[in-house]
Amino acid sequence: MQGKHILLGVSGGIAAYKTPELIRLLIKQGAEVRTTVTRNALQFVTETTLQTLSGAPVYSDVFAAINEHATEHISLPEWADLMIVAPATANVLAKCAAGIADDALTTTLCSCMAHKPILIAPAMNDKMWENPAIERAVETLRGFPNVRLIEPEEGLLACGTSGKGRMPEPDVLCEHVLAALTPKTMQGRRVLITAGPTVEPIDPVRFVSNYSSGKMGFALARECLRRGAEVTLVCGPTALHIEGYDRQLTYRPVQTAQQMLAAASEAFPESDLTILCAAVADYRPASVAQEKLKKQPGIDTMTLRLVENPDIAATLGRKKQAGQTLVGFALETENEEQNALGKMARKNLDFIVLNSLRDEGAGFGTDTNRVRIYSSDGAKKDCPLARKEAVARQILDGLTT
Ligand code: CTP
């Protein structure tokens, strides 16, 4: 979002308290943010907060005594790459659908409507959301080519009841903005990604695993989703999650390598691009104890017998059909290039992405990575150290160029 201009419209619902955080997240992503508000919005969030965080005056009054904002409802939309209205109250939704412009926010929105991408995040009580007049306004807005509605979530509402009407959290809204600004270069493509560690049980309370956080695989999945692909994410246990792509994302959580192989094999025949990012345990305990293993008094060593796990990459490599692209990762500590190229050939991969643990900032658990991409036709691309989000973009660009 570097250098992108985001215009945020805030209307008067309790969810307005989340918008300062949204501004912070958008700016963290490199965007410039300007705000326009309804008078009621200022009951929930102050002009000072919005102005301080965005670093720009808040457009709140069409007829401000000081005339510096005289044509802001025209110049702000011209400045903006995208407008997001969050929260959009029932009142603003209905006005927007009808083309009514009677304050700073709605006049700005009105002049944006035909020219710029617009995201609208309705938030209200569930009874108001079910009002047929609001339903009709929502339907009307769905028909506008530039407008995308961000569906309200089910959950606890400000009035104490539970139902549909919550505005999604700021990180989800920020993701919608990112997706809306990303060119849909992967529209219609189906992508399978494995991510995270596998966990191989020893007994009901212990397991063999590794330090993989899943961050690289999740960053790749998110970038594919932003580019319009349909993604199946087969993932070992991690604390990560992806929200905001209900229709595009199939999430298949697994524990063991065998479960990962089963889930990946199921999705593989339909996949155009498969990226195997998971740190799969090469071996698993030969047997899983039904009861917790007890310490044996007087015995100071213990031997755990391991058997080999299936190699998911090699299995899929054998099944690969023309038109399918298979990408593996190699995390190496020595003879990096030679080992990576060997793996690419052995597993019948089209590309291999090499991480060297000798590179500072690369590898498990970090937020950054530095990779080299090798293709089976002999090409090689060096990517500079970057945050995993940026590395995901470099990798996906590297697979197509
Ligand atoms: N991989 C896999 N299934 C396995 C082991 C690895 O799908 N059982 C995939 C990884 O997701 C990665 C690539 O194969 O894309 C290379 O993984 P790595 O662990 O580096 O390779 P190994 O073949 O296990 O080699 P080694 O452990 O000897 O380095």
Image (cartoon, grey):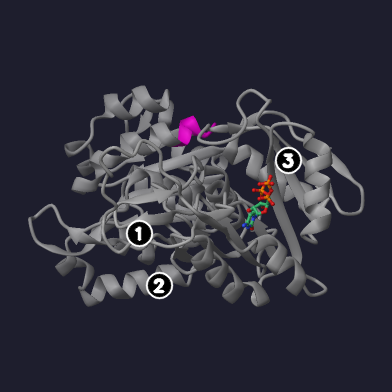
Amino acid type at mark 1: Ile
Q: Which residue is mark 2?
A: 140
Q: Which residue is mark 1?
A: 100
Residue 323 position in % (x across, y down): 80, 71
Residue 98 left/right relative to 17: right
Is residue 28 on the magenta stretch?
A: yes
Q: Which residue is mark 3?
A: 354
Instruction: Say if residue 400 shows up in the picture.
Output: no
Magenta residues (range):
26-32
Amino acid type at mark 2: Thr
Residue 310 position in % (x across, y down): 61, 64
Q: Is residue 232 above or below residue 296?
A: below
Badge 1 or badge 2: first in the primary sequence: 1
Distance, label 1 to label 2, CA atoms, is: 14 Å
Residue 398 position in % (x across, y down): 78, 47
Mark 1: give few (<14), some (14-19) or many (20+) Cα within 10 Å. Answer: some
Q: Secondary structure at mark 2?
A: helix
Distance, label 2 to label 3, CA atoms, is: 49 Å
Residue 228 position in % (x across, y down): 61, 61
- Residue nearest the observer in this picture, 151 or 344: 344
